[in-house]
Image (spheres, rainbow, N blue to C red):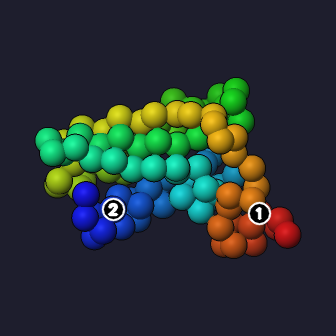
Amino acid sequence: MNEELKENIMGALELVIDPELGVDIVNLGLVYDTEMDDEGNVTITMTLTSMGCPLAGTIVDQVKRALADIPEIKEVEVNIVFNPPWNKEMMSRYAKIALGIR
């Protein structure tokens, strides 16, 4: 996948807001990896802020919808992992400011 497409994917994922925290999943540091095969199938490897997150299905659906308008993408698979575990150090400066974390 070229850099421009990867930037488009990450930009689209910035539209996916974690419903509990009100900040997008990219700035929260929840997106670990993006991969695309030759057929246009994309795998997003990401985590959640907690293992028992009740909104996991909602977030996965939002990820798929956010990427649906990118013409190069045919299918989206969201791979939820918990290793490495998420922590507040993974957040961008923007997310920390938005949530009042130092």
Crowding near the residue tagged with mark 1, few <14, some 14–19, many ≥20 C-alpha atoms within 10 Å: few
Quick check: can you spot residue 17? no
Q: Residue drawn 65% across and 67% down?
A: 92
Mark 2 secondary-structure assignment? helix
Mark 1 secondary-structure assignment? helix
Q: Of residues 42 and 54, which is closer to you in this image?
A: 42
Is 66 above or below relative to 48? below
Residue type marked 1 = Leu
Quick check: can you spot residue 81? yes
Q: Residue 47 at x, y = what percent?
A: 59, 40
Determine whether, in the image, residue 78 is placed left or right of residue 57. left
Task: Pick the quarter of the image with the N terminus.
Answer: bottom left
Residue type marked 2 = Lys
Residue under label 1: 99
Residue under label 2: 6
Q: Residue drawn 44% across and 56% down?
A: 13
Q: Of residues 38 and 98, which is closer to you in this image?
A: 38
- Rendered image quadrant of residue 61: top left
Q: Residue 89 at x, y = what percent?
A: 75, 59
Is 41 above or below relative to 87? above
Q: Which residue is at the far right?
A: 102
Mark 2 vs 1, N-terminal side: 2
